[in-house]
Image (cartoon, rainbow, N blue to C red):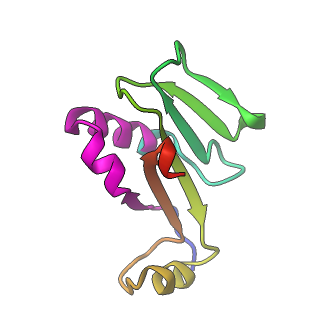
Amino acid sequence: MTETGFLIILTSNFQFTIPPEVAGEIIKQTMQTIRPEGKGQDFIVFDPQAKELRVEDEGRTMIIPTKAEDKCYAKLDDFGSVEALREDAGMPELNTQYAVTIMLAEDY
């Protein structure tokens, strides 16, 4: 079984460092943008010094300007199957093979 929903993981550093209104915008932009490999960008850099949105890394990485004071990343991981992610996460109710981790750059 495969599915294209996402398990969202926020690092504690991200949760406690980024103000809620900015974190909400980063999460929203991530969910609107991130896609499995070959279908769009599977890595996003939220860069406070970026002046414009751009794509790098042969289309894999999107750079998005942000109001966050710290650089943040969103990274999509494909576990290969729903069952593999269920087992890895210890969450038998999951219906996706994709996990998206949103973190500060220093957490990567």
- Residue at image position (57%, 29%) is 63
Q: Residue furthest left?
A: 20
Where's residue 13, x and y in %?
34, 51
Q: Is residue 62 above or below residue 40?
A: above
Where's residue 53, x and y in %?
55, 21
Please name whichever residue, 71 or 44, is drawn nearer the observer in this view of the structure: 71
Image quarter in which the N terminus is found: bottom right
Query: Magenta segment: does it hold 77?
Result: no
- Residue at image position (62%, 42%) is 41
Specify start and end residues of the magenta stretch as a single range: 5-30
Please name whichever residue, 17 or 22, is drawn nearer the observer in this view of the structure: 17
Where's residue 22, x and y in %?
28, 32
Left or right: residue 90 compared with residue 64: left
Chief secondary structure of the magenta portion: helix
Q: Is residue 86 above or below residue 52?
A: below
Q: Residue furthest front?
A: 106
- Residue at image position (54%, 15%) is 52
- Residue at image position (47%, 33%) is 71
Q: Residue furthest right?
A: 58
